[in-house]
Amino acid sequence: MMFNKIRTAMTLALTLAVVPATMAAGKDAAKLGTELTPLGGIAAGNADGSIPAWTGGQTEKLAGKHAGDIPLELFADEKPLYRIDAGNYQQYAAQLSGGTIELLKKYPDTFYLDIYPSHRTAAAPTYVYDAVKANVTNCELAEGGYSIEGCIGGIPFPMPENGFEVMWNFLLRVEAPSIEYTFKNVVGNADGSHTLATRNEISFQYPPYYRDADPDNWNGEYSMFRFNTMEPPFKAGESLVIRDSIDADNPRKAWQYLLGQRRVRRAPTVAYDTPDFVASGANYFDEVQGLLGHIDRYSWELVGKKELFVPYNNNGFIAPSAEEAIADFHLNPQHVRWEKHRVWEVKATVADGKRHAVPTRTYYIDEDSWVILLMDGFDAEGNLWRTTQVTPFVVPAVPATLIKTATVFNLQAKTMSVIQSLNGETFRVVDVKPETFFTGDAVAADAVR
């Protein structure tokens, strides 16, 4: 990779200049596993005990019903502690995101939050913990924050000092080296009706989490996937392959197979704020899984850490059918588990010389797992326009807290897009595939067969 060192030095200097002093307190790897969790969260609970101490996370396999490797009965016997709804949300407003409040106001008769006891289930394999500790001293931002160098195999910045580092922690969050699953994309229309956009099968691979991953031999590709559409019939057989990289000059390679053309073509526009054709255009491509793709359209400001009510430990949300799990205008609140957790708040503002349909965004990222839990998007006038809810689930087979389903609400159009619904589907941790599987040539060869 070729990096512009002058631009890197100038941009990074400006970035670090705005870091709050409390965030830049130095990085001591010895804190991991003691006052911090091995992935960088505060190990202790909060003052009133509503957030417990981290005690190792959920690493044991669980009995009961499964969707492949996802246990569906995590804390099945627990009842909500209390409910937040349109009538009482004001007393909890300091611990609610703007998007959550707007949904409570917009749908006062049907939307609410059932608040459950908080469980800090996030965990990772021991080899990942070892890599994270090494990353503390080896990992550095490059390209003005739009790339990294010197690290692999775990969270790159467990003690982040700026917004770029938090976002790289998300992009390189803990994953199984290779997974396969099926999913549905469901569009919620303004009249409350639902439409199945597509049903797909997908393979994901995460090279930084290969057991033999080595930063000196890594080409920078951190995620690759290939999926095939199964429904509806007129789209069955269409395919998409994407390979994402830390290389700021060449962040994404994509290939698409279209039935009508019967050929594979490069797909350079499958990124950022291009409407997602897999979901009938109801969301942008970079709203998949909270944020999918490179971060180079934005500047990233670390606002700080706060306690927030967020969707969490939502294995149970996967158990019902999609028809049961999705209500007219939002997810069915009977099936969504909310807990109080500490999150990093990061503000994204379109960078100089760049463009994006959503000029400002605020992300809320879990301190324990580094997954995005909520996102609020604002229009050019600063009005709240979009909000995303991500429903994380625990997979002890990794072990890790993972995210796939993200629900994007267009608050102005009164529509929603449920992206990668796992309801009625299956999810498995599988053996690593040859990376040639994730190429346009492989898709073309399979299409011929």
Image: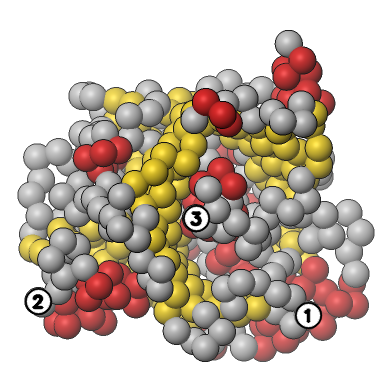
Q: Is residue 153 above or below residue 47?
A: above
> Of circles 3 and 2, which is in front?
3
Which of the 4 quarters of the picture holds residue 46? bottom left
Q: Which residue is mark 3?
A: 282
Q: Is 351 situated left or right of 193 in this image?
A: right
Please state, as top left, top right, bottom left or bottom right, where the N terminus lies in the image: bottom right
Amino acid tagged 3: Ala
Q: CA distance from mark 1 to mark 2?
A: 44 Å
* Residue in view at x 58 percent, y 21 percent: 431
Q: Which residue is mark 2?
A: 87
- State if disc 2 and disc 1 touch (CB < 8 Å): no
Residue 294, x across and y down, in percent: 68, 59
At mark 1, the secondary structure is: loop
Decide which of 123, 63 is in the foreground and name it.
Answer: 63
* Residue in view at x 49 percent, y 78 percent: 378
Which of the 4 quarters of the picture holds residue 2? bottom right
> Of circles 1 and 3, which is in front?
3
Q: Is residue 17 above or below residue 55?
A: below
Q: Which of pointers 1 and 2 lies earlier in the amino acid sequence?
A: 2
Q: Which residue is mark 1?
A: 353
Q: Is residue 180 above or below residue 335?
A: above
At mark 3, the secondary structure is: loop
Mark 1 neighbour density, 10 Å: few (under 14) some (14–19) many (20 or more): few
Amino acid tagged 2: Gly
Q: Is 64 situated left or right of 169 in this image?
A: left
